[in-house]
Image (cartoon, grey):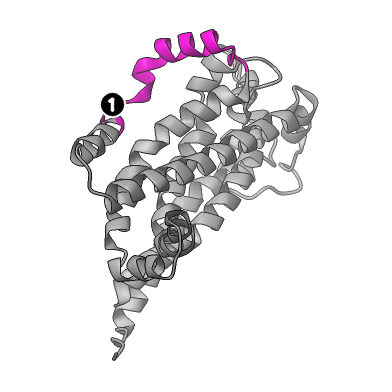
Amino acid sequence: MHKARQNPLHVAAAHGALILYCVIALFPVFVIIINSFKDRRSIFREPLSLPNAESFSLIGYQTVLEQGDFFLYFQNSMIVTVASLFFILLFGAMAAFALAEYRFPGNTIMGLYLALGIMIPIRIGTVAILEMMVATGLVNTLWALILVYTAQGLPLAVFILSEFMRQVSDDLKNAGRVDGLSEYRIFFSLVLPLVKPAMATVAVFNMIPIWNDLWFPLILAPSEATKTLTLGSQVFIGQFVTDWNAVLSALSLAILPVMALYVIFSRQLIRGITSGAVK
């Protein structure tokens, strides 16, 4: 089959758009990082300038590492984020495959029911969620956050992945059944590799809200042993006085892992966008 030639103008436009997006998206991150290496006076006087011999200071990082258990907060955030994304992608993909592949009474109603979670914020049920966690003894545990974030991300995951699952060739799946593959083998070996861009999209959309969330960690896991990085950083923000050096330093340290996760998942996401743009 003849492969369509890629238009150089389309390729250049796609790459240019990605570069512009990166510049716009990374500029606030750049400002936060450079100001984390300045003294307090320079942060307000010259926020856009690079630190020099006079303004350079590590007082913010020293404060972050000395006050509170930063590494424990970091570990808790990583565990909650990675575990939540794993369960969102696993259960979301399995539910989407079932809705897209099998026809049964109530298929459409089930899909609409799962999609309701996109329109109804989970925070509306905060009181009921807290009562459930108290009844099950999960308050002040990381499992409470993982379960809530998994439930929060599943509706969008099912909605996005089910559309991609329907585009997977039926001939490929039927060929696997003829060869004796089980439905689980077909799902994990044939279908999932073909919907990696969609799974990357779901991961990116859920990753940052989970990492930056303050609401549920404050309500469900406020103890010192289960604090996330976002909640732990609030110790530097007071009602009347804010330690901006420590706040910017904590934000800079918190940005690094989420950027690494973003790069891991966005490769598939960008590959899917650019391949669709240049065909």
Residue 184, given in percent of the width and then of the height, sits at 46, 54
Magenta: predominant secondary structure element? helix
Residue 211, given in percent of the width and then of the height, sits at 54, 36
Which residue is depicted at the point 79% across and 32% down? Answer: 62
Residue 42 seen: no
For label 1, the SS is loop
Q: Which of 145 and 71 is in front in this view?
A: 145
Residue 217, given in percent of the width and then of the height, sits at 55, 21
Which residues make up the magenta segment?
A: 117-140
Query: Residue 192, located in which quarter of the rendered image?
Result: bottom left
> For the view shown, which residue lies furthest in the bottom direction?
2
Residue highlighted by disc 1 = 120
Q: Does the magenta stretch include residue 84?
A: no
Q: Which of 61 and 232 is in front in this view?
A: 232
Query: Residue 254, located in which quarter of the rendered image?
Result: top right
Which residue is depicted at the point 47% across and 31% down? Answer: 149
Q: Which of 118 and 15 is in front in this view?
A: 118
Q: In this view, does 81 lie above or below 204?
A: above
Type of amino acid under label 1: Ile
